Image (spheres, rainbow, N blue to C red):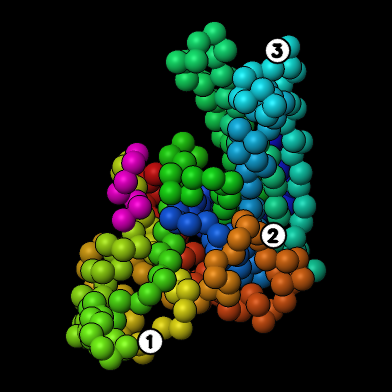
Amino acid sequence: MGCAGVAAAGDKRDAPHAPHVLRFLAERSGNLYRLAGGIAAAWAHSGQRVLLLEEAQDYWRWTMNGVFDRRSRGRRKKETEPAAPPEPTTSTLWASPDGPGVLVQHTCMWEVRYPSWESDRSGPRTDRSPLAAAVADALDAYDVIVLLPKSAWSYPDRESATAHVVLGEIDIFPDADCRTALPGTGGEERGVPLSPEQSAAVLRERCLGFLFGFPSLPIQLDGVIWQSNGELPVDANYLAGIDRDMNRAGLRPLGWTLSERWPAPHRQLPEPDQLKDLRFVQRYQPIAERLRMALDARPVGRN
């Protein structure tokens, strides 16, 4: 099983910066595919060669297929051939008719696991060389490689990713402290307004806490994108105050966006027609430009 064949974006050209291998991190991944696709499309429309490197399936989706018999209540079938992994696929989602910009999607298995059937207490051995090979094969052909895993968005691929950007999803914007229900009135009393600095502290605690849970590996973040699942109740000056406090805390703000779905039930990239639509792409251009500047400003060789 391999992921060969992804280096197909056209002629190689010199670039001022080394290719970036970008991993987005989020507690929930329903809306992240759409955001990543929009940013990648904005990069491609600006003349960059972008690869969306997508994991075909979670390992257990195919390797356990046929191993367990549902009618036998979880007991292993005997003499069952292991399921064959899906073949890699490559498709061009958008290409500039008169420039180098291109957006390519390559889907393949990222890892191979070898379960030990001799003992139920033996954990599987994991081989992540397919992902490493796919990234290595694409480095000379693309300016940016965006990793799109099927699961475990919050876990950094430290072996392959060179940059990490976190998506902070906001369900209820913290512009005031707790609301207190008034007995007998059937209404609520609005809490005391929070300052932008206080709101920033709440956002870090509420939306970025997943980064500090298990396995709690050190992550060097290159920026934070904030996405609200509802209309923002504050103005641009208030958001600018939050951004300043995020910078003070070492979290580079890359922009604010509103989700179109609440939340997207599946991990779906934007439709091909949307990736070609300049009106759709332009919505992501400001964040894409700031993110690219942050990536290009990274120290050479930092992981």
Q: What residue type is labelled 3?
A: Lys
Q: What residue type is labelled 2?
A: Leu
Q: Which amino acid does label 1 sit on?
A: Pro
Q: Distance between the residues labelled 1 and 3?
A: 60 Å
Magenta span contains residue 214: yes
The residue that disc 3 covers is 78
Mark 2 or 1, which is nearer the eye?
1
Q: Quadrant of the N terminus?
A: top right
The residue that disc 1 covers is 233
Q: What element carries label 3?
A: loop
Residues in magenta, as a range: 209-215
Number of residues whose C-alpha sits closer than 10 Å to that of mark 1, classed few (under 14), some (14–19) or many (20 or more): few
Image-based side of 7 in relation to 158, left or right: right
Callout 2 touching callout 1 (CB < 8 Å):
no
Q: Is mark 1 on a helix, strand or loop?
A: loop
In which quarter of the view is residue 72 placed?
Answer: top right
